[in-house]
Amino acid sequence: MATNNNAARPTAPLAAEDEAALASALDENTLAPFQELLSNLTSSDNDKRQRCEKIFDVAKTTRLETTIKQLMRTLRNQEEGKRQNAEMSAVLLRRSIAKDGEFLLTPPNVSQEVLAMMKQELLNALKEDSMKTDNASKSIANKTRDVVIEVAAHSIDDERDEWPELLPFMFGAISGADTSDKLKETVLFIFGALSNVLGERLKPHLATLHSILQASLQHANNDVRLASLSAACSFVEGLSSTEERNAFQDLLPLMLQTLGASLQSGAEDDAQEALAMFIELAETDPRFVRKHLVDIVEAFLSIVENEDYEDGTRSLACEFLVTLTEARDRAPGMMRKLPNFVPRLLKALLVFCFDVEDEPEWHQCGDEENDDAGNGDRFDVGSECLDRVAIALGPNAVLGHAAQMVQALLSDPDWRKRHAALHCVSQIAEGCQKGMMKDVIGSATPALHLANSDPHPRVRWAAVNCLGQLCTDLGPRLQKKGHKMVLPTLMGCMDDAANPRVQAHACAATVNFTESCPTEVMEPYMDELMTKLLSLLRGGNKVVQESALTALASTADTAQETFSKYYDHVVPLLKEIIVSANTPDYRMLRAKAIECVTLVGMAVGKQRFSGDAIEVMNIMQQLQANGFDADDQTTSYMLQAWTRVCKCLGADFIPYLSTVMPPLLQSAQLKPDVTVVNIDDDGDQNDDDDEDEDLEHLEFGDKRVSIRTSILEEKSTACSMLCCYLDELKEGFLPYIQPVCEIMVPLLEFYFHEDVRRAAVASLPDIIRAAKRCVEKRSSPECTLDWLKQIVNYVIPPLITALGKEPEVEIQAVMLEALAECAGESGELVREFIPKMLETFEEILTESLDRRAERNKRATTEDFDEEEMEALEDEQAAEDEVFDQFAECIGTLLKSFKSNILADIEPLLQSKIAPMFAPERSAEERRIAICIFDDVFEHASEGGATMKYLPGFADACVRGSADADSDVRQASVYGLGLMGQTMGQNFTPYVPGALQALAAVIRDPSARDDDNITATENAVSALGKLCEHQTQNIDAKTIFPSFLACLPLTEDAIEARAVHAQLARLLQNDTYKSYLLGENNENLARAILIFAEVMPTASSSDKVRLCDQETATAMKNTLVQMQSTMPGDALAAAFAALDPQKQAALQTCMA
C-alpha cells in the first residue's frame, strides 16, 4: 500500500543520535522502541524527558501517519506492564488529531486507509476495554472515549458523515442486552459530548433516543444513570426547537431521581457533577424545567438548606436556582411567582452569610485587601447570590421579605447574624434601588443604628460598609435627606482608634457619600470633617492614612472652590508625604498623596494652585525619571495626576508634555498578556492561575483563556488620559496628534477591553477637532487642508468599519455619537464616506430593531407582569441610545450637506424610518422617526426638496401630537412648527389640522405637569412659527393673542430663548404688533408682563436665562419706542398692573 506519511512540516533538526532513536521508534516491525519513547515522556530525568519530547514532536510533525499507527498499536497492546503506555498513547492520540482547530488526519498527512483503520480500532478498543473491571482499564477506556469524541467532532457535521459506523455502533452498544455497564456509560457520555455535532443526524431517531434515555436513567448502575443525565442535558441543549426539547420534559423526574440517588448514597462528587449538568440546562433553556418547576425547586432548596451536605454541593444547588431567577430574557417572571420560593431562597442565602470567623488578621489591618479575612466560602456564595437575586427579581419580590429577615437578625446576640443582616442590605441595594428610594432613611436606619453602637468591630465595619454602599446606590437622595445622620455617623466611626479597620472603612464610605453629594450639603460639615481627616493623616495606621487621603481628595473634589479655606493646611502636608513616603511599603500612600494634591489643585483652580503646581510637577518629573518597579501602582496614579494638572493649568501645561507623553504613549501601546491552554492540560498551571487575582479567565469549548487585567487597566487609563489632553490642549497638542491618531484607530477593534475601545472612540472627534484648530490657526506649515484631509481619511473609514463589527450595543451608541461629531467637524471632507456610512447605519438599525422585536416577545409569555415590563424597558434603554445617536448622525449630515444629501439617505428614509410612523411601532421608534424627519425639514427644505415627504409627515405629526408618550408629542409639535416655517404656501392645506393639534396639547388639563411641560412649550413655539410664517392662513386676530397668552416659556430654556427672541422680532413689525397687542392695545399689559419676567437680571446664570442679550436689547428698544408711540395712560396702566418686584426688575433692565 502506497502511503505518503512523510509530508514535511518545518521543524528543528535532531542530533544524529536522536535521529536514530526516531527511526527506531517509528519502525513498524517492532513496538518496543516506541513504547520506551512513550515511557520516557514521563521520566523524572528532565534531560531525558525533554529529549524524548523533542523526538516525539518531530515524529508527529514529519511522519504523522506512522506515529498514529504506532500509537494505535500501543493503545491496543495492553499486556501487563504496558497499561501506562496504553493510557499515554490515548492522550497523545487526542493531542495529535488537530492543531489550532485544523483536522490533521487527512491526506497527505494520513491516508484514508489508515484513518479508517484508526476509527475501527478505536471502536474495538471501546468495546473490549469496557469489559474489563480494573481501574487501569477504566482509565484507558475514558481516554479512548475522548479520542473518539475528538475524531468524530472533525468527521461529522450537518452536511457530511465521514464516520458512518459510529452511530450504529453507539445505538447497538447502548441497547444491547449483553453490553457492559461501562460501555453503556461510555457511549452515553459520547452522545452527550457530540450532541451539537450529531444534533441534526439524531432528529430521525428522537423517539428511540427518548426511550434509551428513559431506560438509562432508571438503570441500576449509578455511573450509567449519571452518564444518561449528562447525555439528556446535553442533547436537550443541542436541540434547535422548543417543541423538540419539550418532548423530553417528562424525563425531568427521572433526572431528578438520579441526583437524589447520588446524594442518598453519599456520593457527593457524583451529585456535584449532576448539579453542574442541571446548571448548564438552566442556562440553555430555563423554560424546559417549567412543567416540573415546583418539584425541582423544592428539591434544590432542600439541598441548599441541608447543612449535612458539603459546601460545594449546596453552592451548586444554589447556583441552579439563581440561574433560573436570572433567566428573565427567556422565562420572565417564572420564579417570582413560585409560592414561597423567594423567602426560602433569601433565608438560605442569609444563613450562608453566617459563615464568617473573627480572624486576627482582620483586626491587625496591615493591608486594606484583607477586609474579607475570615469570610468563608459559603459567605462568598451567599453574598454574590444576594446581589444577583435582587437584580434579577427586583424590589417588589425581594425587599419586603429581606426587610423582615434583616430586622429579626439585627438584635440577635450572635455577632455573625447581625453582620449578615447588614451585609444583606448592602448586597440587595443595587437590585432594590427603586424600592429603597421610597424611604432612604428607613433603608439606612439599621446601619446608622449599629455603626457606632454595636459591641463587635466587624459588625460596625459592616454597618459602615452598608452606609457607603447605600450612599452610592441611593445617592444623591440619601445625601440630601439623610446628611444630618449619615455623615456624623461616619465621622464618629473615624474616632474608633482601637479598630483601624473601622476607621479606614469610615473614610472609604465618606468617599461614597461625597461623590454624590451637592456642595451646599457638604459645607456645614467641612470644618469637622477636615479636622478628623487631617488628624488621621498625621498619626494613623498606614491603611487608615491611605483611606484618609482618598476621602480628603474626594471631599476637595466635591467642595470645589470652597476648599480654598483648607488649602494651606493640606497641600504642604501632601507635598511632605510625596517626598518622604519613598519605601516600598509606602508606595500606595505616596500614590494617593499625588492623586489628592492634584484633585485639590483642580478644586481650588489655577490661580491658587499654580505656584505649588510647579513644585508638585517637578517632584513628579523626578519620580518618573527614577522609574517604577513593575508592581508599583504609582504609574497609574501618575498618569491621571498629570492629566488633572493639565486641566488646571491649561496651555501653561504644554512645556511638560515632553515629560508626560513618552510613558503615556508607552502605556497606551501595551500589548494584552493573554494565554490560551487546554482545560484538561497543565492542571498545576491552571491551579496557579486560579490563585492569581490579576488574571481573568474565560472558557471557550476546551480552551481556557487567561488575561492579565492590570495591563488592560493601565492601557485603558492611558487611552482615557490621551483623550483629556486632546480635549484640553487642542492645537497645543499638535506634536502628538499624529502618533495618538495612529495608536487610537487600531484600538477601535480592541475586543479584550471595552473601556479601551470607548477611549479610542471618544478620542477621534477630539483628534479631528484639534487638527482643524491647528489648520485654522496655522499652528505650523504642515497644518494644511490636505493634512486635515489625511487625518479625516485615516479616522473615518476605520470608525465606520468598527461600528459594523461592534458586539456591544452600548459601544455602538458611543461610536455613532463619535461619528456624528467627526462628520460635523469634517464637513465636506467626509463626503466620500457617506455611502458606506449609510450602509452601516442600515445594518445597525436593522439589528437593533430585530433585538427589540425579540425582547418584546417576552411580553407574550404567561408569567409576564408589570415588574417584568419595567425590566424590559430598562434593557431597551441601550437600544434607545443607539436610535438617538443614529438620528444624531443623520441630523449632522443634513446640517452639513442640506438637500444635497437627500438622494443618499432617501432609501433609508423610505425603507426604515417612514414605517416607524405606524401607531403599532414602539413610542421610541415613533419618536426617532419624527425627530429624523424634523431634521429633514429643518435643514433640507430649500428649493422644495422635501415636498414629497410633506403629506406623510404632516399626518404623522398631527397624529403624534395626541400620542400618549410625551416625547413623541414634543417631537411631533416641533415638526408642525418646522413645516409651517419652511414649507410656505405648500403647508396651507395642513394649517387647520396643525392648529387644532397644537391647541389640544396646549389646553390639555395636565399640560403643565412635569411629564408634559416640555411638549407643551414646544407646542407654543410651533404656534408662534405658524403665526409668523402662515399668517395669511390663520385667523390672525385670534391666534396671535392666543400665542401671547401662552408666554412666557419658563421650563425649556433653549426653546424659551428662541420663542422670546421671536416675540421681540414680531413686536418690531407693525402688522404683527397690531395682531399681538390688539386693536385697542388690550394685550399690552400681557406683553409688558412677559418682558418683565424674561429680561435677565444680574443674578441670572447663562443656563437659566430666558432670553439672550440681543433679545433683551430688542425688548428694551421696543419699550422705549412704546413710550413715544403709545398712549401714555395705556402704558402707565400696563406698568401699574405689574407687582412692585417686577416693576423694579423692569426698571433695572431699562436703565
Image: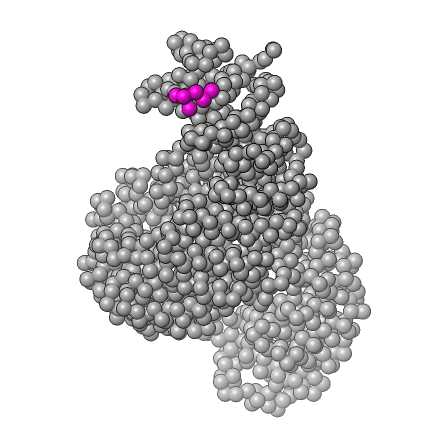
Q: Nearer the viewer, residue 919 or 400?
A: 400
| Residue 456 placement, left or right of 165 | left
Q: What secondary structure prevails in the magenta region?
A: loop
Horizontally, is 1099 left or right of 193 in the view?
A: left
Residue 117: x %, y % from top left? 58, 20
Figure check: 101 above or below 1004: above
Is residue 39 shown above or below 544?
Answer: above
Magenta range is: 77-83
Residue 253, given in percent of the width and then of the height, sits at: 55, 53
- Which residue, as the protein is rendered here, is positioned at the far right? 989
Residue at horizontal 57%, vertical 70%?
1052
Residue situated in front as seen by the camera: 487 or 141 = 141
In the rendered image, residue 197, in percent from the top left (x then y), is placed at 60, 36
Quadrant of the snapshot with the N terminus: top right
* Residue for point 27% across, 39% down: 626
Left/right of residue 563 with respect to residue 215 in the rendered view: left
Give the vertical position of 37 relative to 489 (above or below).
above
Is-magenta flag for residue 82? yes
Question: Quadrant of residue 490 in the image?
Answer: bottom left
Q: Is residue 859 magenta?
A: no
Q: Position of residue 631 (x, y in %)?
A: 31, 41
**Can residue 994 be seen in this snapshot?**
yes
Question: Which residue occupies 53% across, 64% down?
Answer: 338
Residue drawn at x 71%, y 48% is: 904
Task: Say which of 541 and 746 sits in front.
Answer: 541
Res 506 seen here = no
